[in-house]
Amino acid sequence: DSVNYAVLDQATLFYQGKTAFDFNSGFQIGGVETNSPELSDQIDCAMLPKINADDPDYGAETSNIPIVVWQNSEHPEICKAFIKKLYDKDTYMKFLEATPVGMLPSITGISDTPEYQKNETVKKFSNAVDVITKTMDMGTAIGFEKGPSVEAGLLTSQGIIESMFQDIITNGTDVKKAAKTAEDKLNEVFSSIQ
């Protein structure tokens, strides 16, 4: 049944105690505190599984959201001012505090500040912060392997690749046929930004 589960479906099973672990992020902490607070003192984060205990640690897929000012923007100066405001230290700290450990600092030095370190969730789940930060630093977002890419956001947000694999696995669709269908859908999405 889980072949069609979205991230929230999988997380819900974890909150209900029906699964022992979930491949997720620090956002899971807030989900547990909201949905199953009795589990809050029983959860933590671990490095990704390995075949052998002495295999090297490896990075996870990360999630990056590009912030862009479109060439044809009617008010590029307002867009640029908004982006600049996002990086103002006070604004950025409020952003991080909205979902502690779910949102981790991407600006160098923020994690060393007393303002960041005094957050109760950050203190309680400091191991999770360390594990997630280490894994993120070793990983990359799909399509961002060579730097930011607007197309990569479209690639990962449409579910086209996932649907392709599901079609192959659950329906037995020929791999080349499913790949061609996915390619056509991706090209259609990419044409919207050209």
Image (spheres, helix red, strand yellow):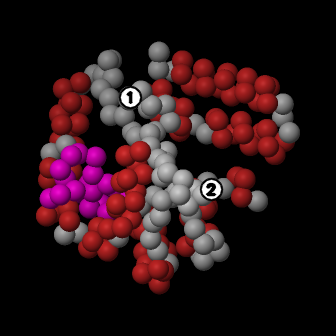
Residue 8 shows up from this direction: no
Residue sitting farthest toward the front: 54
- Quadrant of the rendering where the N terminus is positioned: bottom right
Does 111 appear above or below 38?
Answer: above
The quadrant where residue 175 appears: top right
Residue sitting farthest toward the top: 194
Marker count (numbered):
2
Give the label on residue 51, or none.
2
Q: Residue at x 68, y 28 (%)?
A: 182
Residue type for callout 2: Ile
Sequence-wise, the earlier of marks 2 and 1 is: 2
Residue type for callout 1: Gly
Q: Secondary structure at mark 2?
A: loop
Q: Is residue 112 magenta?
A: yes
Does 26 appear above or below 44?
Answer: above
Q: Residue at x 53, y 37 (%)?
A: 156
